Image (spheres, rainbow, N blue to C red):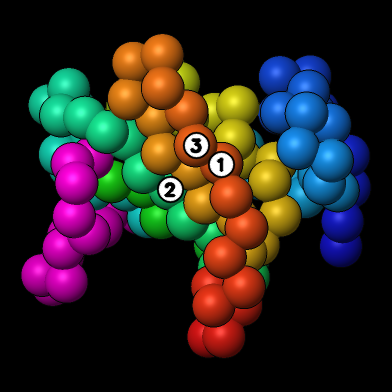
Amino acid sequence: MTRMPTDPVQLATCLRYGVECVEAPPHSKVGIAENVRTGLQPLNGLRHPPEGDTTGWYIWAGPELSTAPGFFLPVHVEHLSEWAPEVIRYLGLPPGWRFLKAGDHEDVWYDPTLLDV
């Protein structure tokens, strides 16, 4: 079910890119890499369609996405402020969207291949 996000920063990000907001509720989970806590840049995120109690978001740091088992840890959205508060603004972007953030540099784009799960 699509709802307007309760986070005004997420709503503003979606409005900026002209997309419908798809809330990532605080009790739902993202897949996040431990390397996000190291300060490694850039921060990357991609969103597959949500499934079960997950948001569909996968977030990692660095130039490449690892395929190593256990690379992504399940973390509740409500705990992301402890991991990477700067990514929270992107969580309302709908499935099929990606972001890359490195300091003041930001790229946000639609990738339809993310919907082919």
| Real-space Cα separation, disc 3 to disc 1, in angstroms | 4 Å
The crowd level at tag 1 (other Cα within 10 Å; few <14, some 14-19, many 20+) is some
Residue 42, position as x, y percentages in the image: 27, 33
**Residue at 22%, 59% in the rendered image:** 65
Relative placement, left or right, of 81 versus 112 is left
**Residue at 87%, 56% in the rendered image:** 2
Mark 1 / mark 2, whichever is N-terminal: 2
Q: Nearer the viewer, mark 2 or mark 3?
A: 3
| Real-space Cα separation, disc 1 to disc 2, in angstroms | 9 Å
Looking at the rendered structure, the number of numbered marks drawn on it comes to: 3
Residue 58 is tagged as: none
Mark 2 / mark 3, whichever is N-terminal: 2
Q: Nearer the viewer, mark 1 or mark 2?
A: 1
Residue located beneath label 1 in the image: 108
Relative placement, left or right, of 80 versus 36 is right
Q: Amino acid at mark 1?
A: Val
